[in-house]
């Protein structure tokens, strides 16, 4: 079925920046304090407190901005990079961690002073020359080089900087960002980005947001991308290849940039042509599109087996079908603009994006959402669909399994049936609006649904999100 495209062939299956800067450190500090043991003393915690990925993210600071300057040579697969992180301490810090794996570090400073560091697995432990104070802004500059290697996720998928025959497919969910830049690698921390990539002339480097500059000199082309709206590290990309590029503005003034591997072009064309109408349809349903840029990166990356909703511009491992295009773009609202605080809540991303596929089909002459629901519900209790409840995948190995996508979507369909269409769509829009450019948890979603509908929805969500086995259907 459809989900298998995204699940990996090898696996079973309006806050503005200013406001954020002002409020996030406090909120984050509170979260971290609540999350955890390791924020004691003056060392930042090595993780953000996520039980599925305990070392993902770090404590003690928030990254406001990443400035990444990269140079990639597809022939030798060599990457040179400099990352400048503008961060803010949320506690006293004599030491803090970044997530970074593989590449060799050639220089590291904090506020231009050489800093001590040591590496321990994915943790890059930095000891600045002086102590940082709560609320203080600081800059970390890391220079690095080498041959980036993807990580293998608990579900067996490749993740991160994945070499292709003409460049690299770059995607980072949930862990891979740290294979190509030092990061506070958890969706709890969102930042703006400037990503500048130099590649041999003839290749294109495509990243997030708006292309603010491009120039070719001495046989190399430099692409400068800017993502202003806050973004989780896993949604960053810098995909490199031989691409056909198409740029236009939509009627709503969105800047669209599509980059397509010529070998995928004829198959991709009829689907990409629908992007403006898909975004318009999604905007009607979910509220205003959350970013100023949009687009698609259609690569040929046969060893990847999934597409990713990289912010403002999803990346596809091959020409997508229409439902995949709908899915990845629905994530721009659900997953990208409204981010997870914990990977356990992944159904808030995948269940919603899958339900968007069902709705699209329903409203465009295909199967009704009810029919999609019924076809799944007909599966026997022994089917993998019922292997675990979507609100509790159990570990990072299962966050992209069928129950998260399909039973997650079924949960929303049940909600819709219970509260009626008007209230249901108001809930979706309110969710996207209230948590725009921020975060949302399952508990907050349940609370919002109850408030908007005036109903006690506890039994519904308990059954569909948290109960083991195939739910009894009323
Ligand atoms: N979020 C992606 C999608 O459903 C799937 C990413 C899968 N990643 C992985 N490491 N298995 O569109
Ligand atoms: Zn998805």
Image (tube, grey):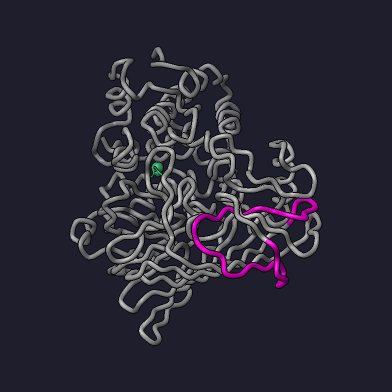
The image quadrant where one finds the C terminus is top left
Left/right placement of residue 94 relative to residue 443 reads right
Left/right placement of residue 296 relative to residue 335 reads left
Can residue 106 be found in the magenta stretch?
yes
198 above or below 474? Answer: below
Which residue is depicted at the point 31% across and 33% down? 13
Label tally = 0
Frontmost residue, 471 versus 133: 133
Quarter of the picture for ligand 2?
top left
- Which x, y percent locates residue 333? 48, 47
The image quadrant where one finds the N terminus is top left
Residue 270 in view, yes or no: yes
Can residue 50 be found in the magenta stretch?
no
Image quadrant in which you'd find residue 218: bottom left
424 above or below 286? Answer: above
Left/right placement of residue 263 relative to residue 332 reads left
Which residue is depicted at the point 46% across and 32% down? 422
Residue 254 in view, yes or no: no
- Which x, y percent locates residue 264? 22, 59
- Which x, y percent locates residue 446? 56, 28
- Which x, y percent locates residue 433? 56, 45
Q: Residue furthest bottom?
A: 218
Which residue is depicted at the point 45% across and 17% down? 468
Q: Which residues are magenta?
A: 89-116
Image quadrant in which you'd find residue 124: bottom right
Left/right placement of residue 22 relative to residue 48 reads right
Q: Residue furthest left?
A: 266
Which residue is depicted at the point 52% across and 33% down? 344
């Amino acid at each position: 079925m459809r989900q298998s495209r995204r699940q990996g062939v090898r696996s079973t299956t309006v806050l503005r920046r200013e406001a954020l800067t002002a409020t996030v450190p406090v909120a984050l500090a509170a979260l971290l304090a609540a999350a955890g043991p390791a924020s004691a003393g003056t060392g930042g915690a090595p993780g953000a407190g996520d039980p599925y990925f305990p070392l993902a993210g770090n404590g003690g600071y928030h990254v406001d901005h990443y400035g990444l300057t990269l140079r990639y040579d597809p022939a030798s697969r060599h990457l040179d990079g400099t990352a400048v992180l503008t961060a803010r301490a949320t506690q006293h810090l004599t030491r803090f961690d970044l997530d970074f794996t593989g590449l060799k570090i050639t220089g590291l400073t904090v506020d231009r002073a050489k800093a001590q560091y040591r590496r321990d697995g994915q943790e890059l432990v930095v000891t600045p020359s002086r102590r940082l104070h709560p609320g203080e802004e600081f800059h970390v500059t890391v220079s690095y080089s080498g041959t980036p290697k993807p990580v293998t996720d608990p579900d067996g998928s490749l993740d991160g900087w994945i070499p292709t025959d003409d460049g690299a497919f770059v995607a980072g969910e949930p862990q891979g960002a740290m294979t190509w830049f030092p990061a506070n690698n958890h969706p709890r921390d969102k930042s703006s980005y400037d990503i500048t990539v130099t590649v041999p002339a003839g290749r294109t480097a495509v990243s997030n947001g708006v292309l603010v500059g491009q120039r070719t000199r001495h046989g190399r082309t430099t692409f400068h991308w800017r993502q202003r709206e806050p973004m989780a590290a896993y949604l960053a990309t810098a995909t490199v290849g031989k691409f056909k590029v198409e740029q236009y503005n939509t009627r709503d003034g969105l800047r669209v940039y599509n980059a397509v591997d010529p070998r995928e072009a004829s198959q991709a064309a009829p689907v990409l042509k629908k992007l403006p109408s898909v975004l318009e349809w999604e905007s009607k349903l979910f509220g205003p599109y959350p970013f100023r840029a949009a687009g698609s990166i259609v690569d040929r990356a046969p060893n990847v087996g999934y597409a990713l909703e990289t912010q403002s511009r999803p990346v596809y491992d091959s020409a997508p079908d229409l439902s995949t295009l709908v899915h990845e773009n629905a994530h721009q609202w659900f997953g990208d603009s409204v981010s997870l605080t914990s990977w356990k809540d992944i159904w808030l991303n995948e269940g919603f994006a899958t339900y968007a596929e069902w709705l699209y089909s329903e409203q465009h002459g295909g199967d009704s959402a009810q029919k999609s629901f019924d076809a799944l519900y007909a599966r026997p209790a022994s089917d993998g669909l019922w292997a675990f409840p979507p609100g509790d995948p159990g570990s990072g190995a299962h966050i992209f399994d069928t129950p998260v996508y399909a039973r997650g979507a079924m949960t929303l369909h049940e909600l819709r049936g219970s509260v009626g269409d008007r209230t249901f769509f108001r809930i979706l829009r309110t969710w996207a609006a209230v948590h725009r450019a921020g975060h949302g948890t399952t508990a907050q979603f349940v609370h919002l649904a109850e408030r908007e509908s005036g109903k006690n929805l506890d039994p519904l969500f308990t059954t569909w999100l948290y109960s083991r086995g195939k739910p009894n259907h009323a």
